[in-house]
Image: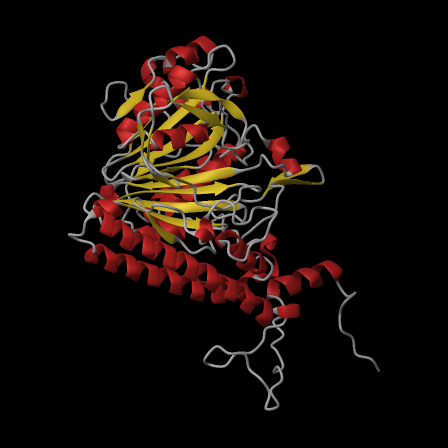
């Protein structure tokens, strides 16, 4: 989505505007995962995006049928294009064949903002309806922008099927040419990659079947005055993206956190100068992990706040008395005329929805794609099992069940917000209770999905689809109900700054007369008290009255 970073958007951030929105996509190839799955993640971060699961059934179209193109971010009508004879079913950012596409916007040179018919969101969802594989998707996407023009700014896409994952970066040519220039690279098997609102493709081989690019990607940069060296030295990112602290610390920093957690210990420390000051070697497009990753690893990576790194958001005074790993917008601020920044972690409060997509060719066709789907903040959500064969979004995730201005207690998005927004105030005290419920649900879901994988072997597609849809519907309803109960529990337990005592069975402790037992006064942490005493000196000091 449109980015909420420093690069070319400092003014928007300072104002905390609606356009300050952003995304993160992490990647693991089949050879880098424990079960041989391709995996990509996505966090649709926006202050105004409602968390829901998009769904489009397969369809046959008559000759001459057209498709209306509506811009994803603004809902503005951009035009129409001819429809194809048959479109595939999609559920979220995955289609019935297990093809999945994620994105992150990096904007780039403002004069190259596209003026065509296909915006980046439409490019994703039209392609999901028309392509079966990642390579086919690249062809469909580039043909669409070549024929009908590109309507957005610089964009990175993760494009994955059960066999391989590609990163494609694309930017328009400005007002005089509706087309686009682009580069796509296949992530080598056994490696992990990622992007988070900054262009990540630098130099690339010019004669490699695993690297594709528009024929004029270098020529156009020369024509525009963005590049003047040898073709072999051409960097797509350097030519078309913009560089400042936000692009590196605020965007590459998220990818660095992923690499730092899973690359061999200590190897990513060398790239901290790049992240913090733009010095030294640029962050690589991919690295080899020290161990195979699981879908659970990717889920927890989407919950990252730079914990246990030099950028740990729970350690500075901004975390307050309860180690809160969140910072409210605006992201940048000034003190005595000097500008400072909060960190920009993968997990953030304004996420509309996120997912971990897991594609495996060895599973039944009805579940070769699993979209682990969550609404609101990835840190506190429950990732729900949605399959490539899922025929429709469960009611709790459906469009029309509440919206950003209409609370619905049947909406997964709203109950997740009910829980998360209480924790933002007293994070260290509340997060253990949240983790207990969250882990219990996700463990139960994992067991149910593993059991289903075995039970549907040999079943027809229709029978397998029915069984899997029942799992999706059951766990979505259960997680939504359990989180509403969790939110109620948190409100009761932590009311008025106190912490009510509990019995071993989890019930609240009462007196012999049945009244509420005296609560624990949780207070604040030592740093909070020291900050007050250091600032106020003797003003609040307890003195002996004689």
User: For the image shown, how many numbered marks are present on the structure?
Assistant: 0
Q: Please tell me which residue lies in front, 375 or 173.
A: 375
Residue 423 picture location, percent across and down? 56, 60
Q: Please tell me which residue lies in front, 256 or 137.
A: 137
Quadrant containing the C terminus in the rendered view:
bottom right
Q: Please tell me which residue lies in front, 131 or 506.
A: 131
Q: Quadrant of residue 142?
A: top left
Q: Residue furthest right?
A: 546
Q: Is residue 79 above or below residue 290?
A: above
Residue 156 picture location, percent across and down? 41, 30
Q: Residue furthest left?
A: 458
At x 57%, y 42%, the residue is 47
Q: Residue furthest front?
A: 62
Residue 387 picture location, percent across and down? 31, 47
The type of colouring in the image is secondary structure
Q: Quick check: can you spot residue 47?
A: yes
Q: Is residue 176 above or below residue 417?
A: above
**212 left or right, relative to 324:** left
**324 left or right, relative to 337:** left
**499 left or right, relative to 142:** right
Q: Quick check: can you spot residue 303?
A: no
Q: Is residue 269 above or below residue 319?
A: above
Residue 529 picture location, percent across and down? 66, 65
At x 47%, y 39%, the residue is 23
Q: Residue furthest bottom?
A: 512
Q: Please tell me which residue lies in front, 10 or 445.
A: 445
């Amino acid at each position: 989505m449109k980015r909420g970073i420093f690069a070319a958007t400092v003014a928007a951030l300072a104002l905390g505007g609606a356009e300050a929105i952003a995304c993160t996509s992490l990647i693991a190839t089949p050879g880098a995962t424990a079960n041989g799955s391709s995996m990509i993640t996505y966090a649709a971060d926006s202050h105004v995006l409602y968390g829901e699961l998009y769904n489009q059934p397969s369809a046959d179209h008559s000759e001459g049928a057209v498709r209306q193109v509506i811009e994803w971010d603004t809902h503005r009508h951009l035009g129409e294009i001819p429809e194809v004879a048959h479109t595939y079913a999609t559920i979220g950012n995955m289609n019935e064949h297990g093809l999945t596409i994620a994105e992150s916007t990096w904007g780039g040179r403002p004069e190259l903002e596209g003026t065509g018919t296909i915006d980046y969101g439409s490019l994703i969802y039209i392609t999901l309806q028309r392509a079966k594989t990642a390579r086919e998707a690249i062809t469909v996407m580039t043909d669409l922008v070549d024929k009908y023009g590109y309507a957005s700014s610089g964009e990175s896409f993760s494009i994955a099927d059960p066999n391989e994952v590609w990163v494609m970066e694309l930017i328009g040519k400005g007002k005089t040419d509706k087309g686009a220039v682009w580069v796509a690279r296949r992530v080598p098997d056994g490696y992990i990659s990622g992007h988070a609102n900054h262009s990540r493709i630098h130099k690339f081989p010019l004669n490699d079947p695993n690297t594709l690019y528009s024929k004029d990607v270098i020529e156009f940069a020369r024509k525009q005055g963005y590049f003047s060296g040898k073709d072999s030295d051409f960097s797509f990112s350097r030519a078309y993206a913009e560089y400042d602290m936000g692009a590196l610390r605020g965007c590459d920093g998220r990818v660095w956190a992923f690499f730092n957690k899973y690359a061999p210990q200590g190897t990513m420390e060398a790239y901290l100068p790049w992240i913090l000051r733009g010095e030294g070697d640029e962050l690589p497009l991919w690295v080899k992990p020290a161990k195979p990753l699981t879908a659970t690893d990717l889920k927890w990576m989407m919950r990252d706040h730079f914990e246990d790194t030099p950028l740990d958001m729970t350690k500075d005074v901004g975390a307050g008395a309860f180690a809160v790993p969140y910072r409210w917008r605006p992201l940048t601020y000034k003190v005595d005329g000097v500008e400072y920044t909060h960190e920009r972690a993968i997990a953030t409060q304004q996420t509309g929805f996120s997912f971990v997509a897991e594609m495996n060719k060895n599973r039944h066709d009805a579940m070769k794609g699993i979209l682990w789907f969550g609404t609101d903040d990835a840190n506190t959500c429950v990732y729900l099992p949605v399959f490539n064969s899922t025929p429709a979004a469960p009611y709790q995730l459906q469009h029309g069940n509440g919206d950003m201005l209409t609370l619905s207690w049947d909406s997964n998005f709203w109950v997740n917000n009910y829980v998360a927004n209480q924790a933002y105030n007293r994070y260290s005290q509340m997060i253990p209770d949240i983790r207990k419920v969250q882990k219990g649900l996700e463990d139960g879901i994992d067991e149910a999905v593993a059991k289903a994988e075995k039970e549907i072997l040999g079943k027809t597609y229709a029978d397998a689809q029915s069984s899997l849809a029942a799992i999706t519907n059951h766990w979505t309803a259960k997680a939504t109900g359990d989180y509403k109960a969790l939110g109620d529990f948190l409100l009761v337990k932590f009311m008025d700054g106190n912490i009510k005592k509990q019995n071993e069975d989890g019930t609240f402790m009462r007196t012999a007369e049945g009244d509420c037992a005296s609560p624990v006064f949780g207070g604040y942490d030592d740093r909070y008290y020291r900050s007050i005493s250091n600032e106020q000196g003797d003003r609040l000091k307890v003195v002996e009255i004689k």
